[in-house]
Image (spheres, rainbow, N blue to C red):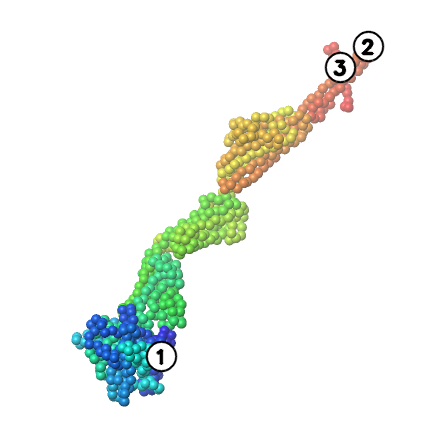
Amino acid sequence: MSREAHGRISHFWRNLNWFARLGLLVWMASGAAWAATFPASSAFHPLNRGGLALVETTDQANKTGDNDATNENNIVGASVTPIYYYTDGTDLFLRFRIDSDPTGTGQQKIKGNSYGIEFDTDGVKSTYEYYLKITGGTSGAEGIFLFKNTSHSNSAIDKPSDEPDSPALRTYSLVTSGTGQTYRITQADSSVNNNTDYFLDFAIPLQDFFDESGLTLDSPMRLYGGTAPSGGILQSSGGDLVGPDSLTEGFSDPILVSGQTASTGVIKFVAALDGTGDVTQFDPGDTVFVRVDDSDQNSSSSSVQTVSISITSSHGDTIQKNLSETGNDTGIFTASLATSLAAANTGDSTLQVPASGTVTATYLDEADANFTLNQPRNDTAAVGGGADGVVEIDPSVVPGASANITVTDADLNANTGVAESVDITVTNSATNEFEIVTLTETGANTGIFVAALPTVQGTTAGTNDDGSINAKKGDTLVASYLDQLRADGGSSTLTDDASVVAPVVEITKTVTPSTAKPGETVVYKITFSNTGNATAHDVAISDSVPSTLTYKSGTIRTGLTEPASTTKTDTSGDDGAEFDSGTKKVSHTFGALAATESAVLVFQATVNEGTASGDTVANIASASYESPDGTARGPNDSTPVNLTVGQVAAVSVTPETAAKNGTAGGTVDYPATVTNNGNGSDTFVEPSDRLDGEDLPGHGQRR
């Protein structure tokens, strides 16, 4: 039978309601005319034995007395197929290749022989259960007969000649053409023994066979064929057996009633719906895939078929699942199934599984290649107990840098052939801003997932889930990962923290004394402190000496504490300190400055002569540095420090030296010039002089 025909009759009969079935059977039993529609030769299926095409020879083991004469009692097939089988879903057809024309003469429709098939339907090869034959001869003996065989004498065990029960279950008249045709004789495509060979085809209604045998289209059976003299039972004496004179050795390979070759089904857990891979373990929550291979369930080459299985977890949850063929005419059936870690619940479509348990998929193979019936085929997969995952984030992160995140969890490595991903959440606990971060597996089958989350310097929350997170010194970033399957079978949210760290170098400056006169020297002290929570690297201090002051050579001193006790040179490149006379800049590179650590830089300068009294000389110092991640920061400037220029008193008196004459009691004027040579205004003081020990009063005026 073609697979298409099998599919049509299966669909037709199985979908009739019982009223329709009853009506059909009543119609068939009422004697209405039945006629088979005989198929083309190409539709018949040759039978196999031992995996090879069944042949008819004269020298097979245990075969004696076969009639191999060149007549209609001789079945031929040493080099061609001797026996065929076919069903179109409506009728059951058998075909014999005969050495000469079996057409009868006179009242005989077929010459006086029987051509029959014995059916093994219970899998016991030493007996047969049904016998279907076409018999020629006189008009009263001719016909097609279906027998049942239930009584087996010891002498008849394993013998084709075992007599069936009497009378026949069903009898059909021989009608060679037109309405009610039941058999057909046609010229064959061979000429064994130099004679033209003939095909003898005959049929019975398939439903009659089902009704008497209880079989279905999917039932397995074996066939044994031959001829019998004078309308009797198959036997080697006077007949021609197609095979050894032993049922055990002579039965064909199993086929289904549909005509499909019986195959042994296989079920297994696989990695994908296309049926690829082989899975021996999965974790709760995974989607599992099941595959069944059974070519005899591929009843139609032009449509997708289904099979049913059951899947049971070790704690008792069971689901019945239909598997669909992966395509037309593949004989491979697959399905997917969701799982969860939970107590058994047989009322839903999810398979509940226990941690560290097992799951068994079972397929009932109606018939295998060895004619073993209704065999359960199983495959078992272990349910993982889970692996304890770990989430890690950099212990510290500098604003503006990226926080590196790692999740290690073997449970997430569901597909060993690709790099997978997992989402976690990172929250700034100070602002509650959060980001969903996707971590990607470092490679196929590693179970290690990584990502980097950019941070942005910010004192307030940024936009949630925008790809970066605002952070400032002192904040804490919390990475949270939901480990859905722990080693104990439970779940847990795992966290790890990152401290937001940043160096902050603050700088102050003083000048001593705060007032100085031209020519006097002042001391500038620069104090710089790391008030952040991370080490500042490559700390550099610079101070430009004001134009009204002159740096005092060799006065640079440094230290971590007061007083600055380390003297530095003015030369560049030898000890980190220098004075650049071109730019009038004092500078020093300190290297690293730990959090909360401070240092000082001291140098001296002299107020230039001529600097106006009361002038204010402003000066600032700057600090630049790097964060631990290499980010340049600064310059940070100090608050300006002011130096007031003091007044210098410098008055000179120059008297006139010319001789003066006077009279007794008279007044003689001695002119003198008083000059202010200082850097500020002085209060005018009347000059005085002494002459011969006497004080001489004076008076004067500004000019």
Q: Which secondary structure lies at badge 1?
A: loop
Which residue is pictured at 25% across the width and 79% down the height? 70
> Given the image, on which type of amino acid does mark 2 rest?
Ala
Specify the label residue 664 is tagged with.
2
Closer to us: 271 or 126: 126
Q: Name the residue under label 1.
A: 39
> Given the image, on which type of amino acid does mark 1 rest?
Pro
> x%, y% of residue 703?
77, 24
Which residue is pictured at 57% across the width and 38% down the height? 635
Relative height, residue 395 to residue 35 (above, below) = above
Specify the label residue 696 is tagged with.
3
Relative height, residue 211 to residue 694 (above, below) = below
Q: Which secondary structure lies at badge 3?
A: strand
Rounded to the nearest angstrom, the CA distance separating label 3 from label 1 is: 165 Å
- Please report whichever mark, 3 or 2, sits nearer to the chain's N-terminal start: 2
> Few, some or many C-alpha atoms within 10 Å of disc 2 (few <14, some 14-19, many ≥20)?
few
> x%, y% of residue 421?
44, 54
> x%, y% of residue 157?
19, 74
- Residue 616 occupies which quadrant of the picture? top right
